[in-house]
Amino acid sequence: MAPPAPPVIAAIATPPGRGGVGVVRVSGADLGALVAGVVGKPLVPREATLATFRDAAGAPLDRGLAVHFPAPHSYTGEAVLELQGHGGPSVLRLLLARCVELGARLAEPGEFTRRAFLNGKLDLAQAESVADLIDASTATAARAAARSLTGEFSREVNALVAALTELRMYTEATLDFPEEDVEFLAAGDVRGRLGAIRGRVDRALGRARTGALLREGLTVVLIGRPNVGKSSLLNGLAREEAAIVTPIPGTTRDTVERVVEIAGIPLTVVDTAGLRATDDAVERLGIERTWAAVDRADLALLLVDARAAPAPLHDEDRAILARLPGALPRVVVHNKCDLAAVPARVAAADEAGVAGRHVWLSAKTGEGLALLEAEVLAAVGAEGVTEDTWLARERHVAALRAAATHLDAAAVHAAGVPPPIELFAEELREAQAALSEITGEFTADDLLGVIFGRFCIGK
């Protein structure tokens, strides 16, 4: 007995508010009654038809275009109806209510795209890229999401899975002849094939890490003693007067945030209160918020005065560096190089031998800002943004890392004498399963609920 057809779903597919055009989208196995009840006449598949949308009494609700996409040639793989009318909230709600009156139910967030995934129109990585394309905050991220939507990322993952499947087939066949374990490795160039797959996983992982940065962005916190130019640097990076700048120490009492874009990656830059000993209760509260901002940052920029003497870093600067979380990337920014009469530059250490990334610049004149932007990308491993980057998610990065770990374990087994073929085969299976999670070939239902629950309604 065939399972019952999924219910017909309907939703407003355009953003809230007023607009020139508004769309109500409907999807289900049979939309004949709904088309007759709203449009009142048959529709030619995939052809826009001018129609009057009517209520139960035949009174007009709106006038617009109706487009019918028969299954399976539609976004969801089911029959889909789009009613494209005027973009007023009231008229769209009336039209949606009419669809519900005719048997549809309100769609849940992401339910149209979830049906597209379940019906094989999109794999899971492509389905996620639909939401990522909508949410993209930079042009680079939007182009990367579009590449993922067309299946570039999925094709690379599927190619890796195919290579692993071929190696697994050879390995499984060898299990029937355990006395030939050693010969099997040489005859099939198993180590070479495994190394090639491992290299491809590394390259995919690098692109996915960059893609995750494009999607998620970074939080960069500006810290340092009062009057070293943190607010000026924020204004320089934002290309606007985002923060108040005065020569009075302690002007910044709270965090100030601006989103800027560097090489297509969105960065939330956080200006903070100057760090110093103080009896001012308000300033102390600002300093507490500074350290709270550090705790949630992906990168810290410690600003110091390039005119400092006799040492480039004061004891207070070194104390700030010492208090930063050990795993937090940081760049020391020697600001006011124009006043110090030194050129903008980059170095691996300052003159006192403090290791790490150092940039000399002038936040006031803008000299050296481009050097800092490059160092910021390098510090977080994001200097590889190119036109072929995919937009990826943290779960994709985690899956690729898991696959790499299993392939490394497989290489250890392959080096054994004699090689434990059963363990080698199991690591290959685990690596393939990790990669298959990306496209949704093996995915738990609860994960699907989390992924599609974050979509907007109507998509």
Image (cartoon, rainbow, N blue to C red):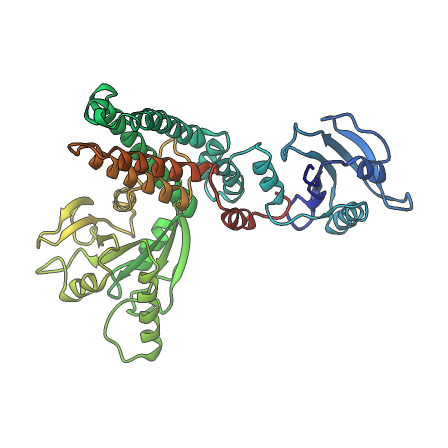
Tell me: residue 296, above or below residue 81. Answer: below
Residue 11 screen position, x and y as percent? 69, 46
Number of numbered tags placed on the structure image: 0
Which residue is found at the position 27% from the left and 35% from the top? 424
Instruction: Give the camera-side residue of 28 and 176.
Output: 176
The extreme top residue here reads 187
The answer to which image quadrant residue 288 occupies is bottom left
Quadrant in the picture for the N terminus: top right
Left/right placement of residue 131 relative to residue 378 reads right
Which residue is found at the position 35% from the left and 54% from the top? 234
Quadrant in the picture for the C terminus: top right
The answer to which image quadrant residue 207 occupies is top left
Left/right placement of residue 268 relative to residue 5 reads left
Is residue 240 at least partly visible in the picture? no
Left/right placement of residue 97 relative to residue 179 reads right
Left/right placement of residue 37 relative to residue 200 reads right
Residue 342 screen position, x and y as percent? 16, 48
Residue 9 screen position, x and y as percent? 70, 44
Is residue 184 at least partly visible in the picture? yes
Residue 20 screen position, x and y as percent? 70, 41
Which residue is found at the position 48% from the left and 38% from the top? 440
Tell me: residue 227, above or below residue 235. Answer: below
Instruction: Give the camera-side residue of 318 and 77.
Output: 77
Which residue is found at the position 51% from the left and 39% from the top? 133
Tell me: residue 27, above or below residue 162. Answer: below
